Image (tube, helix red, strand yellow):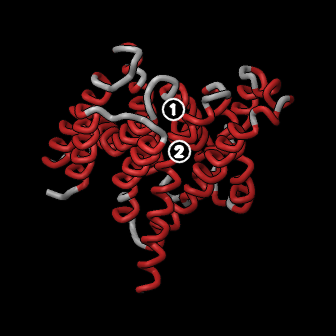
Amino acid sequence: MKNQNVLAWFLLLLLALIWGSSPIMIKKALVQLGPFEIGALRLSLASLVLMPFLLKSLNEIKKTDYFILFISGIVGNVIPYFLYPIAQTQIDSATSGVLTSLTPFFALIIGVIFYKLKATKNNIIGLCIGFLGTSILILFSNSSEGLSADLYGLFVVAATLLYGINLNLVKYHLNHLKPITITAFSIVSILPITLYILFVHTEFPSHLKLINEHLLEFGYVFVLGVLGTSIATLIFYNLIKIKDTVFASMVTYLMPIVAIGFGFLDGEKINLLQFFGMLLVLLGVFINSKKN
């Protein structure tokens, strides 16, 4: 039991480090690569890693699951992984990392609206505090581009909304499947789409010819796809298996701290209003997770 607890804490901290470092890696990749190129390449690499896991569990999937799994891939992976790089062309990585914490709020809202989930008092209080913090982050960031650039944070908010939708799809329609099966199928099934975008609608083919000039940026995307998407997902589900979903959800609080830390080390400046907004978002997430 003691060894299991040590392993669980190790995996939790490792997961927070991996997911918390994703915004800074996207920022670094954007130096020479486009946002659509980053998203498509990241998903394509993740698909290749997850393909063996899918082949092992194909017999577990029913015909009625295919459509929901495909939608899950689009909503939970394709669109969000393009929204993040687009957002980070204008907002800093720390803000992006903190805004990702909104995912539990949107999961709650979708559950209440479409699945008759009952919201508790803490849910409502946490929701209000969290969205107040989000408004402050978006409207009062330190971007030099003014209000129009600040609004790019809404792309991250949109991504967390899609994550919230996907969590409910998985919970209410795919609960009979193993988490790794859901992840593998949803990402591998959209590989034709990501490859089409990558080779037809981005500069990837020309960048590939000059790979030595873009090796560092490709390296960041490789880490995002293999480590930040595939391996991190496997760690997350193993963490749930070792402990439980409540313990695993603690990554929601640790990940933004890591993102802020990496942003600070990279020279990003956080003004007082931004810092206050970040605290409100994390406080809101914390209250939302507490039972009445």
Most foreground residue, 151 or 184: 151
Horizontal and vertical percent for residue 152? 42, 22
Q: Which residue is mark 2?
A: 22
Q: Which residue is mark 1?
A: 84
Mark 1 secondary-structure assignment: helix
Horizontal and vertical percent for residue 191? 71, 38
How many residues crowd around disc 1 within 10 Å: few (fewer than 14), some, or many (20 or more)? many
Q: CB of mark 2 within 8 Å of CB of mark 1?
A: yes
Please tell me which residue is depicted at 20% across the width and 51% down the height of the picture.
287
**Whether residue 63 is visible:** no
Horizontal and vertical percent for residue 127? 22, 39
From the viewer's perspective, is 105 left or right of 172? left
Mark 2 secondary-structure assignment: helix
Q: Dividing the image into 4 quarters, which one contains the N terminus?
A: bottom left
Q: Amino acid at mark 2?
A: Ser
Please tell me which residue is depicted at 41% across the width and 39% down the height of the picture.
94
